[in-house]
Amino acid sequence: MKREEAILVLKELFDKCTNLDGHYLEVIPPKASKDMSLGYQIHIKAALDEETRTCMQDVLMKYQLTIKVEEEDSFIIYSPPAPVPQK
């Protein structure tokens, strides 16, 4: 995702998911990210209840983004690469 989209996603996450309390939040530039994503990544470290997880999933589906759970309270939001067409 582009930097502007990452900022827009973060704003919407914090506007709609009012229980989201990010103790650690970082937008990682494309060169620092791994092969699993296209463009910027959003890293959030927070304890999430079920309501907040559902809210986040709703916002991420809107932008066609994926969330990866690194640890119990550590999450990476990213735009997955398009699948390679099979021959």
Image (cartoon, rainbow, N blue to C red):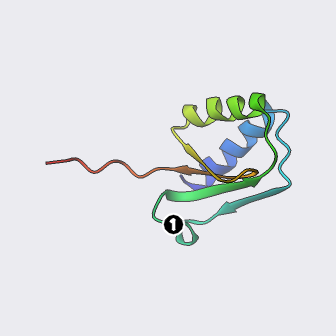
The x and y percentages for residue 87 are: 13, 48
Residue in the foreground of this view, choosing between 7 and 33: 33
In the drawing, does residue 35 fall left or right of residue 59?
Answer: left
Q: Eyeballing the image, is 22 above or below 53?
A: below
Residue 10 relative to residue 5: left or right: right
Q: Residue 74's x, y, as percent?
A: 72, 54
Question: Residue sitting at 75 percent across and 30 percent down?
Answer: 50
Which residue appears at 86% of the width and 44% of the height? 21
Within 10 angstroms of label 1, few (less than 14), some, or many (20 or more) residues? few
Q: Given the image, on which type of amino acid does mark 1 rest?
A: Lys
Q: Is residue 55 above or below residue 13?
A: above
Residue at (68, 35) in percent of width and height: 56
The residue positioned 33% from the left and 48% from the top of the image is 83
Question: In this figure, which residue is indicated by the disc labeled 1?
Answer: 34
- Toward which corner of the image does residue 58 lie, by quadrant? top right
In the picture, measured across the screen, residue 41 lies left or right of residue 84, that is: right
